[in-house]
Image (tube, rainbow, N blue to C red):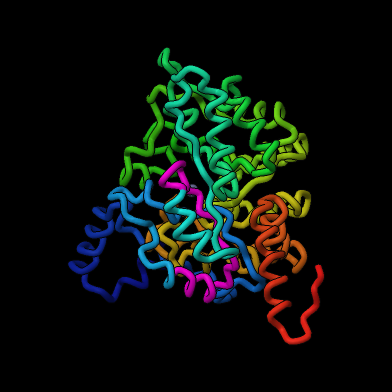
Amino acid sequence: MGPLTRRALAPLGAGRRSLRRLRVASLRLHGYEPRPMVRTAATDVLRARLPAVDAHNHLGRWLSGDGTWMIPDVGACLALMDELNLESVVNLDGRWGAELEANLDRYDRAHPGRFVTYCHVDWRLLSERDGPERLGASLRASVGAGAAGLKIWKDLGLEVRDRSGALVLLDDPRLSPLLATAGELGVPVVVHVGDPCAFFEPVDRYNERLEELMISPGLSLYGKPVPPMARLLEAFESAVGAHPATTFIAAHMAIAEDLAWVGRALAEHPNLAVDVGARLAEMGRQPRATRALIERFSDRVLFGADVYPMRRGEYSPLFRFFETDDEHFAYSSEPVPPQGRWSVSGIALPEELLAAVYRDNARRLIPVLGARSVVDLRAKRAARPGGTQSP
Ligand SMILES: [Zn+2]
């Protein structure tokens, strides 16, 4: 305690003072909620300034835990999308077969242009005869049914094992027919490459995501039989390089903690793009580097929230980040920042970059979305009195 504060407290009785000291001395970090004294501009951005595509979200059943739909009420979801100015949402939860059909029925087919669903493949096929070819055939069937892309989740690299018990990584030659088929079919492959770097580190006093890992210890990869993040990145990049005709989208920017890596990989691989799902905390603590990356690769960064079930309060900081130059604001609506105790600052993208990140890049890289938006446009024009036939 400094002399000034000591003097300021002098009128208080000695008893009260020591009581206060005692309370502070026993305060735990989780109870510490400092209120910033810095005065900064605070812009409420409740709605995206331009129509946006959320290119990374989960609307299906397989992640919900109890097998129910992540979105119980599709009508309410559409109303929320309208409120937020979200034109379309990419549902990454299609799986395959009957589950894919159920997702397509509920979302894509019932509300064309508002939702597109990606499929997965069943990695158990890897242990079967002709597994690699069957993975490619599965993707072909799913895309034939209406899937807009392929999602490769983090289980590949961290958990999926072949018949011999060895972990299978993305650069495994047995995955080549699958990745090549995606290129042939013209559908993007979204890959969850690894996980936040802090999850690979010991859960100790130096870990910047300690609180999150204490709440969800299962997220920690430290000491588990998984490859280091560097190896997962290497496997991802060599698969991208080996399949130049296939569009890859690195979910969560691949490694948002190292934008130099991301920039180098984007420069070396024209068939690579990134989505920003669940990485506001990372982008917002390095706003200048993020903005420079978006300026340099303005055609290959996709907006995405990865907030499920979709919640209005979690979009607002994202919009605020892209649209304003507000400084030092919370990246989440939760009282304690869930991915580390820091604040973020905005990057105030100019209109043309905002349009690219919010919508245009998704429309170009996810052909089904682009095609559907053209169909919608045609339908709208045709419905308008005096509407033209083109384009
Ligand atoms: Zn996700």
Q: Is residue 198 left or right of residue 176?
A: left
Against 316, is 244 above or below? above
Q: Residue at x 53, y 57 (%)?
A: 305
Q: Residue furthest top?
A: 164
Going 39% across and 61% down the picture, which residue do you hit?
A: 71
Question: Visible in this render: residue 132?
Answer: yes
Q: Quadrant of residue 310?
A: bottom left
The residue shown at (70%, 36%) is 184
For the view shown, which residue lies furthest in the bottom direction? 385
Q: Quadrant of the C terminus?
A: bottom right
User: Is 90 in the magenta?
Assistant: yes
Residue 19 found in image quarter: bottom left
Which quarter of the figure is the N terminus placed in? bottom left
Q: Residue at x 73, y 37 (%)?
A: 264
Establish if 238 lies above or below 254: above
16 displayed left or right of 35: left
The front one of 347 and 356 is: 356
Give the x, y percent position of residue 20.
24, 64
Image location of residue 279, percent across then percent down: 54, 51
Q: Position of residue 31 (x, y in %)?
A: 30, 58
- Viewer-nearest residue: 253 or 185: 185
Range of residues picked out in magenta: 77-100
Query: Can residue 260 be seen from the camera position used here?
Result: no
In the figure, residue 380 lies in which quadrant? Answer: bottom right
- Viewer-closest of 333 and 125: 125
The x and y percentages for residue 289 are: 69, 50
